[in-house]
């Protein structure tokens, strides 16, 4: 496996790149001669500019190419750098590679994982910057051409050139861990992150620990492109007095789900927002059950609000999974979830129900399933049971407490997982996520 | 051009930390509403947030329609209602009730179709229902209308041209 050196200040793509003295001038020049497993070193003084940059690295998922911005005082470098720069009209990279410490700056598009085959990339401590102010400015991570690929962005920084920038489109599996939007960034007006804008190729985007303080207070975190997928953001800092939306529009189809867990601009640790085709779920801290779910200080419930799209057949609104550890084996257990809504008319088991997975086979961790939904599609719906639990019912005209419950016999120790399904259209129900098992 | 006819907001009860969910509704002139809900602290001016969001929404609606018109050489698309009005009453009856089993079983034009032909029509209707708007020069629209004519579901074979070009 070879080392290839790149330094724009005195390099030449006509040289072989084997030493700093014989360094290549461009990253593309290095990519033209690399082999799987090679390491490409970029000098701290590397500042490449010009027309569109396109580089296809020879690395594979089993043997990626490593591209490292390092101090050229040593050969090979012994210290990393964050001063290397590529500034171009557009930047397109593909292949399997690990990239450390490079600033990718483009007037229009930055495509660091524009794959045509199964590949995997990691960008570590890099900067992605669009300088253009129009809709041509965007990051696109992953490719609609090939979604059997993964991209991980670790502690990277991001900056958009204008509010008309499209934002960051994703395809395949994309993980953003840590990092921030830098001071001076513009905020894409429609939304920052999304799936593929051009096709239904699918994405699973997970964002953890991202500092979005420097985005506008009106930022929409996700935008609903046509691509299906699961889009999650967790433990991230929002701009002060955030008045934006989790996503810029109602998800276009049942295959899109957007989730925000524990993100806020203030000191809270329970904030939840889920948005899908059938409606939304948000954390609620006033309409809560006495003795119900709490973070130790603040009681909370799930406010499940369906849109007109919700239906039992293909599009119920589904709560986040709620899990509880169970030690008891061989004896019957009843699991209960308490609910509250504002209507004199009870909710039926065709409109709201509980689905539970438990370990029901002795000797094997084989999941068993039970639900308190009505028996089948043709069965007559029956009211869910009334509850005597106490809730704070501020502002309600007809507070109605009911409960969802199932009885089963675990045969193995393990987690019991529960979800609440709300299928009645245009209905708001408060769900206490504290499971009761008796 | 779709415009916003009214923008309103309403504040919910206070949460434990004093913030309130603000429900914001922008009513469009085609009857649709675009709704938002966010958690606001006392530093947020809901009127200002609503006005700014209305401005962005208007700009987005204008941009969408401008690109639609440009891609269709300046011709704006039809709504579903406008397209259905191009059908005769008898044609609308078939168009709207094709999937209803009792109607399909007893209507002579539908019952005469083979299983494959019925499946083709259902696929065409599903594509029509999925579309946000209807363009007469769209291949999907032309295929659907052509298929309805070929299967004898329109009043006459000349009706396809009248629907698409009239």
Image (cartoon, coloured by chain):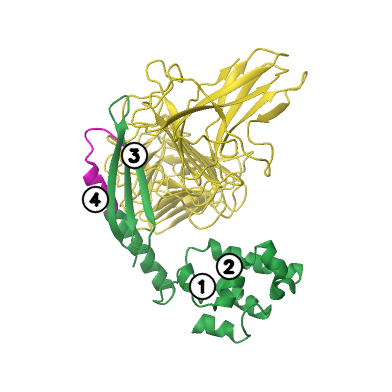
Chain colours: A yellow, B green
Q: Does the stretch in magenta take in B50?
A: yes
Circles 1 and 3 on the same chain: yes
Residue picked out by circle 4: B51
List the residue tagged with mark 1: B84
Mark 1 vs mark 3, CA separation in Å: 38 Å
Mark closer to the observer (1, 3): 1
Whichever of labels 1 and 3 marks the residue nearer the N terminus, that label is 3
- Mark 2 belongs to which subunit? B
* Whether labels 2 and 3 share one chain: yes
Q: Earlier in the sequence, mark 4 or mark 1?
A: 4
Sequence-earlier tag: 2 or 3: 3
Q: Which residue is mark 2?
A: B96
As displayed, is residue A199 above or below residue A210?
below
Q: Percent position (x, y) of residue A133? A: 30, 55
Image side of residue B158 versus residue A222, left or right: right
Q: CA distance from mark 2 to mark 1?
A: 9 Å
Q: Which chain is mark 3 on?
A: B
Which residue, as the protein is rendered here, is positioned at the far front? A344
Write down the quadrant of residue A137 in the picture: bottom left
Crowd class of label 1 (few under 14; some 14 to 19; many from 20; radius 10 Å): some
Residue positioned 34% across, 37% down in the render: A212
């Amino acid at each position: 496996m070879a080392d290839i050196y790149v330094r724009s200040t005195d390099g030449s793509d006509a040289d072989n790149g084997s030493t700093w003295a014989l360094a290549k001038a461009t990253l593309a020049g290095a990519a033209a001669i690399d082999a799987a497993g090679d390491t490409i070193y970029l000098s701290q003084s590397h500042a490449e500019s010009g027309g569109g940059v396109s580089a296809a690295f020879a690395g594979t998922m089993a043997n990626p190419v490593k591209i490292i911005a390092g101090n050229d005082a040593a050969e090979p470098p012994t210290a990393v750098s964050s001063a290397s720069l590529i500034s171009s009209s557009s930047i397109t990279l593909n292949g399997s590679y690990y990239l450390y410490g490079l600033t990718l700056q483009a007037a229009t598009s930055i495509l660091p994982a524009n794959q045509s085959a199964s590949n995997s990339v990691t960008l570590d401590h890099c900067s992605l910057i669009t300088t253009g102010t129009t809709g041509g400015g965007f990051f696109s991570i992953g490719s609609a051409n090939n979604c059997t690929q993964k991209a991980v962005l670790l502690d990277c920084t991001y900056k958009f050139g204008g509010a008309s920038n499209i934002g960051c489109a994703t395809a395949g599996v994309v993980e953003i861990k840590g990092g921030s939007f830098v001071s001076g960034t513009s905020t894409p007006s429609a939304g920052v992150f999304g799936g593929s804008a051009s096709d239904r190729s699918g994405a699973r985007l997970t964002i953890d620990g991202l500092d979005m303080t420097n985005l506008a207070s009106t930022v929409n975190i996700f935008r609903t492109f046509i691509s299906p997928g699961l889009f999650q953001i967790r433990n991230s800092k929002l701009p002060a007095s955030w008045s934006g939306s989790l996503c810029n529009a109602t998800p276009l189809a049942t295959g899109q789900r957007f989730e925000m867990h524990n993100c806020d601009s203030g000191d809270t640790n329970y904030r939840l927002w889920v948005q899908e085709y059938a409606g939304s779920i948000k954390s609620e801290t006033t309409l809560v059950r006495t003795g119900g779910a709490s973070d130790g200080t603040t009681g909370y419930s799930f406010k499940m609000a369906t849109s007109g799209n919700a239906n039992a057949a293909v599009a119920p609104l589904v709560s986040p999974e709620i899990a509880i550890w169970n030690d008891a084996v061989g004896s019957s257990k009843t699991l209960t979830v308490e609910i509250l809504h504002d209507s004199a008319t009870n909710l039926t088991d065709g409109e709201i129900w509980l689905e539970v997975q438990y370990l029901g086979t002795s000797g094997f961790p084989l999941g068993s399933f039970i639900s308190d939904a009505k028996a089948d599609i043709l069965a007559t719906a029956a009211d869910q049971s009334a509850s005597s639990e106490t809730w704070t019912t501020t502002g309600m005209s007809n507070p109605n407490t009911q409960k969802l419950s199932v009885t089963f016999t675990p045969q193995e120790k393990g987690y019991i997982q529960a979800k609440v399904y709300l299928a009645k259209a245009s209905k708001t129900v408060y769900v206490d996520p504290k499971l009761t098992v008796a | 051009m779709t415009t916003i006819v009214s923008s309103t907001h309403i504040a919910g009860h206070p949460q434990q930390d004093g913030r309130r969910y603000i429900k914001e509704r922008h009513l469009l002139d085609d009857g649709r509403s675009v709704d938002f809900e966010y958690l606001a602290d006392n530093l947020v001016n809901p009127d200002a947030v609503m006005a700014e969001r209305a401005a962005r929404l208007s700009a987005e609606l204008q941009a969408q329609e401008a690109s639609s018109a440009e891609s269709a050489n300046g011709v704006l698309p039809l709504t579903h209602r406008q397209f259905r009005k191009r059908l005769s009453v008898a044609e609308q009856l078939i168009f709207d009730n094709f999937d209803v089993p009792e109607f399909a079983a007893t209507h002579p034009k539908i019952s005469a179709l083979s299983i494959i032909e019925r499946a083709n029509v259902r696929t065409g209707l599903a594509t029509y229902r999925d579309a946000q708007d209807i363009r007469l020069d769209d291949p999907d629209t032309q295929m659907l209308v052509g298929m309805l004519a070929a299967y004898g579901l329109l009043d006459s074979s000349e009706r396809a041209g009248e629907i698409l070009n009239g």
